[in-house]
Image (tube, rainbow, N blue to C red):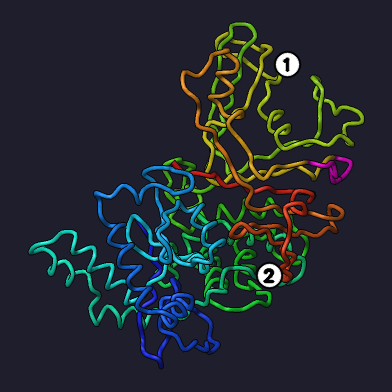
Amino acid sequence: TTVVLKRPSVSMSSAATASPKVSKSKLPIIQPPTFYGCEHIGFTFQEDPGTSRNFYSSATRVALDPDRLTVQKCASCSYMLTQTYLCMQCPMVHCLRDAKKHAKEECHTFGVDSRSGHVFCFQCQDYIYDPVLEEIRIEQEASIDGGVRKRRRLEDSKPSTDDLKYIESHTTFAPCRATGLRGFLNMGSTCFMNVILQSLIHNPLVRNFYLSDGHKQKECTRTNCMSCAMDEVFIEFFTQDKLEGFGPVNLLTTSWKCEQTLAGYQQQDAHEYLQFLLNQLHYTNKGTEQKSEDCSCIIHRSFYGKLQSDVTCEGCKNVTTALDPVMDLSLDLRIKDKKKLVVPGSQGIVQTVQQCLARFTATEKLGVNEYNCGKCSGPKEATKQLTIKRLPPVLCIQLKRFEHSANGSSKIDVAIRFPLELDMTPFTTRAKRKAKEGEKESRPVKPYIYDLLSVVVHKGEINTGHYSSYCRENGQWFQFDDSMVTLATEKQVLAAQAYLLVYIIRTLS
């Protein structure tokens, strides 16, 4: 279903527009003098109100007519039966990708969703609610039914006076600049926490969950709830038109109360904090106690994957299979020989993430003392292989740069190249099985293509280093270094010494 950000009409003296969240800030908010769905539609109406209404009325009539398949076909890529947007300023119809391109090239700001008739603002990057346009949409929707049902449906669809009062009293102005592009204050070696929070803020699945009241603070009865603390961060970032850094004091102190090893101002490992935070958000968002794939919490729906381990006895060829749930993949950066010894001189070899994944899913030999075969009833030589049985929508990859041994800890500074687009198909259980059996697919397999979303970087020594990150927002890369936010290029991102990589699946099936 289409989620519409409602921005109701109000008087000049009250709040101008609405946001999906209620601001908890005690500071007064200066409301702008506009009562349109957003400032951009307001400017359009002020310049030429009649043309804008006529264009929207015509576009909505076409979009809501189930007999017109032309609106389901993109004018650029010719994809059929997909979600499209009808331009409100010209007769073009595009899919979302081409509609964004059209809006940028032609400066046409608004598109009408072919599925619902709602208006999408490409500058706000959100659906908008305007009372005048909504009334037109309802009338066009009702007119399609015709006859006796028309007037009844029109009246039932309009919000009542009480509805409008309720919406107005529970919403506040959300400026278009409140897009989450803010930094976090370093409150004493808290850069490890800042980079993880940035990766979640710019994760569309997690962001949409919290901005749609996925976790309700007022109804939560937990003490030291990490999800409530996380919700406060999203409220601050997406309802306040501020640029200065934000200090998440409540989230930091709640982290200390939930995990004593985090208490204090010593440097922590960003990967360990990510695991801690995901577990806490799972637990505080109605996650199941047991590790189950049936869990419907936002963390499982976004990050849950599954590894398959196959151990094959060299004697009887019996295969023992085990499945393990995972929230991320940890890849070894050391190049080792068949005896599992580090290859001399491999430190200076430039590697790729794909090569690390290939080693992670490669077959390895187990000695007699490492495996007992249940069928042979004794120790046997065997081979073991890890493959990815289930890929998550959000794929987190840790590059194991920190090495700990009895002699101390050290950092591996080897260069690892990573792509903007990652195909995970070759590392899946199905692909590995087909390659081993030498079979050819009767039909082409749909590739599992992931796009790079965030990069966490560690600079310096293992105990005295500093974390920063890169995140992608609306196709543009930004660097987040505590409270400082700057534009970044793809070249800068790809040249970074990555510690954590966050990829997101390109299409959800």
Crowd band around label 2 with a 10 angstrom C-alpha radius: few (<14), some (14–19), many (20+):
many
- State which region is magenta: 406-416
Which residue shows up at 87% across the image and 31% down it?
A: 346
Residue 108 image label: none
- Residue 410 horizontal/vertical position (percent): 86, 45
Q: Is residue 278 above or below residue 423?
A: below
Q: Secondary structure at mark 2?
A: loop
As drawn, the residue found furthest toward the top would be 315
The x, y position of residue 446, in whole percent, is 50, 32
Which of the labelled discs sits on residue 184, or is there none? 2
Note whether 412 is above or below 87 in the view shown.
Answer: above
Q: Residue furthest bottom?
A: 13
417 falls in the magenta region: no
Q: What amino acid type is highlighted by mark number 2?
A: Phe
Residue marked by disc 1: 367
Measure the alpha-carbon separation of dots 1 and 2: 50 Å
Query: Which residue sits at x=68%, y=74%?
Result: 245
Left or right: 254, with 1 as reference point: right
- Secondary structure of the residue carrying numbered label 1: loop
